[in-house]
Structure formats: C-alpha cells, structure tokens
Amino acid sequence: MMTAIQRIQEFLPDDNTAALVTSEVNRRYLSGFSSSAGAILVTKNRSVLMLDFRYYEAATRTVEPPLEVVRFTRLIDDLNRLFLEEKIQSVYIEDETMTVARCHELEEAFIPAVLTDGLSAELNRIRMCKTQTEIEKIVTAQRITERAYTEVLNILKPGVTERHIAVELEHLIKVYGGERVAFDLICITGENTSLPHGVPGERVVKKGDFFTFDIGAVYEGYHSDMTRTVAVGSATDEMRMIYETVLQAHLKALRTIKAGNTAADVDIAARDHIESCGYGEYFGHSTGHGVGLDIHEAPAVYKTNRTVLRDNMVITDEPGIYLPEKFGVRIEDMYLVQGDTPVDLAKIPKELTVI
C-alpha cells in the first residue's frame, strides 16, 4: 500500500512540479508530527518537513525517513533554495486552507509558478480512508467519550444547569485520557434541544425534559463524535414518538452504509423516512460527515454528494427532528465502512434512555 506522501508524489505531473503542504492538520497527517508552524515540500523524489528552532529537535527524534527534517530560518527563502536545488518550476498549494492574501504573497515571493487547483482535493481523497492506526485512535477517542458520558449521567438531575453538565463532561474527557474535547460540547435541555447547535447556558434541567448531548474527545489528534438525547424522569407520548422516528431514520441510513453506495444514499434513506412521517421541514441539516484529524472532513453526507463509500471510511449517521420552542431529538454514531456490514464504533445503546 502506498503511503500518503507517495500518493501525493503520484499526483504530481512531472519532476519539475512540487506540492507545498502548510495547514497544521495536513502536516500532522503526512508527518505524524504536530507543530503550530512549518511546511512540507513534496517533489517526485523527495519529501522535506521544514520546521523552525522550536520544533526541529523534537521532530528529529520522531519523524522517520524518507521524510527529511530541515530547520528553516526564513521559510520563503529556504523554500526558494529548495526549489532551485530540485529544479522546480511550479508548486501546488492548499487552495482550501490558504487565504487569498497569503496566496498572493507566495505568488510574489516564490520563484516557481503557484498552482491553486487540485492539492486540497487530493489530500481530502487520501485522508478519507483510514489506516488501522487511525481507526484505533478514533475508537480510543470514542471510548473516552463514552466513559465520560456514562459517568456524567449520574449527575443529570432536575436542578442542575446545562453549563454544569458541559463543564463536568469536559473535565471527565480530559481525566480519562482525551487531549481535549473535539468541539464545543452541546449539552442542552428542554426547549433548547430544538436548537441543533445550541450552546450550554444557565437553563436548569426539569423533570420531563429531553436533554441532548453532542460530545466528543480528541486522542492523539483524532476525533470522536456522538449524540444522545435522553429523557429526564419521564417522556410524553409525543416525545417517544419523535424519538422513535429519528431512531428508525438512523437505522435506515445505517443499512445503506456499504462500500459502493454513495454518501447521498445514506442521507436520502434518513431523510425519506423523516419526510414520510411528516417531519421533513424539521430536519434541516445533512445526515453526517467524515471524522478523523478534523471533526468534519470528507465525505460530507448530504443528498447530492455522489462520493462513493469505500472500505475504511469513518462517517457519522446523525438525523434529527427539531420542533421549535418544544424539543428536538438527534441520534449520532460513527460507523466504519466495511463491505456490506458497517462497524458501529459506539457501545452506548441508541434506544431511548430515561434517567
């Protein structure tokens, strides 16, 4: 199997073209080394990780050949020196992550011509299918999330605030081995659950509320993502009916997570079910997304995305129904694409839990 750097080298059209990777997440993906600054230059026959004084020694201890580690003084000057050494006439940059101002700066400073079309898309394609090591890190992040979630349910009682639950969850994620939370945690109750990305505040949990957790951890750079909606004390017939509608949409989407199907197939399966039950207008977001070094990465799971699912992709399945001023329900888990049988990366039950 080719390495990610070898795939970029294959992407390059000739010996006189290079790829310059500057975004932090893609530098970490290609090198396994995390730094706030630096660059990776890839040519047909060479790959160089360029770092400043702060990171150089640490990188020499961990980064493995054939990736070379070079310390730079002024990045632009040192890159131009490498361009001359390697006889580079044009260089691809990451068009999706670089600002227009920075792009113009490089166009003026670089000796080679700057190419802005293709490298980001290629990196996205490479990152979509995970290695076994990446999968293990995502699963570890998920187990950390589940452990924190299970423990915090013990304090989810009438009288506690959303903010209190969110703060406790973040603390537990770090206690159990997470580098940090994967995103700003969504811990919301009552009518706030109708807000898909509601922010935890001083709203107090009441008996009969729905409480939504959209939570995740980061482990060695890799993210997890899980959503559960639980009932506090009791649930009305309407709450149970909406929950069951979302659960069935989730399960219908799950049955389409197969290698060879498209991301659109997954979204359409969930959306068609919710629409058939009369709640289509209350499901206004996509059904899922890829997960990895970024919490949201390719493939996006929406109804017009014809990206074909392939083995070792990790995607979420997260339909929801949100009734304004009343309540909302979302159920989300990550799945590993494996032939016709997706692997559920979560161990927390999906059925309605009443606390």
Image (cartoon, helix red, strand yellow):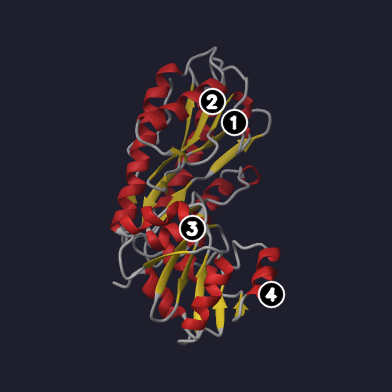
Lower position in the chain sequence, tag 3 or tag 2:
3
Residues tagged 2 and 1 counted as in contact (Cβ below 8 A)? yes
| Kind of residue at disc 2 | Phe
Question: Horizontal and vertical percent for residue 174?
Answer: 41, 32
Find residue 210 and name its label: 2
Closest to the camera, between mark 1 and mark 4, is 4
Q: In whole angstroms, how far apart are the C-alphas of marks 4 and 2?
A: 56 Å
Of the residues shown, which amino acid type is indicated by label 3?
A: Asp
Residue holding disc 1: 193
* Quarter assignment of residue 11: bottom left
Q: Residues within 10 Å of mark 4 (few under 14, many from 20)?
A: few
Q: CA distance from mark 3 to mark 2?
A: 50 Å
- Between the residue at mark 1 and the residue at mark 4, the CA separation in whole angstroms equals 50 Å
Considering only order in the chain, which callout, 3 or 4, is on the residue closer to the N terminus? 3
Q: Earlier in the sequence, mark 2 or mark 1?
A: 1
Camera-side mark, 4 or 2:
4
Q: Nearer the viewer, residue 121 or 350?
A: 121
Residue drawn at x 52%, y 31% is 212
Mark 3 crowd level (few <14, some 14–19, many ≥20, 10 Å Cα): some
The residue that appears at 40% across and 33% down in the rendered structure is: 351
Label 2 – label 1 distance at C-alpha: 7 Å
Foreground of the two, 239 or 258: 258
- Of the 4 image quadrants, the one containing the C terminus is top left
